[in-house]
Structures are given as C-alpha cells and as structure tokens.
Amino acid sequence: MTEKIIDNKNPVLTFEGKKYNVNDLSNDTKEIIKGLQIAETQLKMHEDTLKLLSIGRNSLAMQLREKLKNYE
C-alpha cells in the first residue's frame, strides 16, 4: 500500500507508483499516512498470530492422533 523511505530531513512517501515529499503534505494527509502505517502493523501482527494458532492447532491434532492410537 504505502512505502515510506525514512530520512530525517526529507522523508518520501511512495504511493501507487508516485513519490511525495512528506514535508510538503498537509497535516491531515500525514495523519492518514500514520493511520495506514498503524493498520499495516496491526494486520501483520494478526497474521503472525493466526500462523501461531495454526501451528498450535496442528500440534494438538498430532498429539490427539497419537493418544487415540491407544484406543484402536
């Protein structure tokens, strides 16, 4: 979605193939950029959480499979 090149003096936002000097943008636009960055971070965090839950579920299924072998 957005890519921000970090440079303390001249931060640049790349959005949809165009580059924008962040210092030239309005405060409202900068707030939207911050919101997008937060949303992106949250999405990544929740994707990682889903991966961990999936791994845990698979591990539990393997444990259950082993335990049920005793009942066959």
Image (cartoon, rainbow, N blue to C red):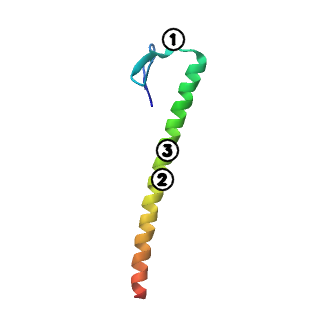
Quarter location, residue 58: bottom left
Q: Element under label 3?
A: helix
Residue most extreme to the right? 28
The amino acid at mark 1 is Asp
Read off the residue under disc 3. Answer: 45
- Helix, strand or loop under label 1: helix
**Near-viewer residue (58 or 16):** 16
Task: Give the x, y percent position of residue 40.
Answer: 49, 36
Q: Residues within 10 Å of mark 2 (few under 14, many from 20)?
A: few
Upstream in the sequence, badge 1 or badge 2?
1
Percent position of residue 49, x then y:
49, 51
Q: Name the residue tied to disc 1.
A: 24
Q: CA distance from mark 1 to mark 3?
A: 31 Å
| Residue type, mark 3 in image | Met
Q: Which residue is mark 2?
A: 50
Q: Quadrant of the N terminus?
A: top left
Mark 1 vs 3: CB contact within 8 A: no
Q: Quadrant of the C terminus?
A: bottom left
Seen from the viewer's position, the closer of residues 4 and 19 is 19
Q: Residue at x 44, y 75 (%)?
A: 64
Residue 38: quadrant of the picture: top right
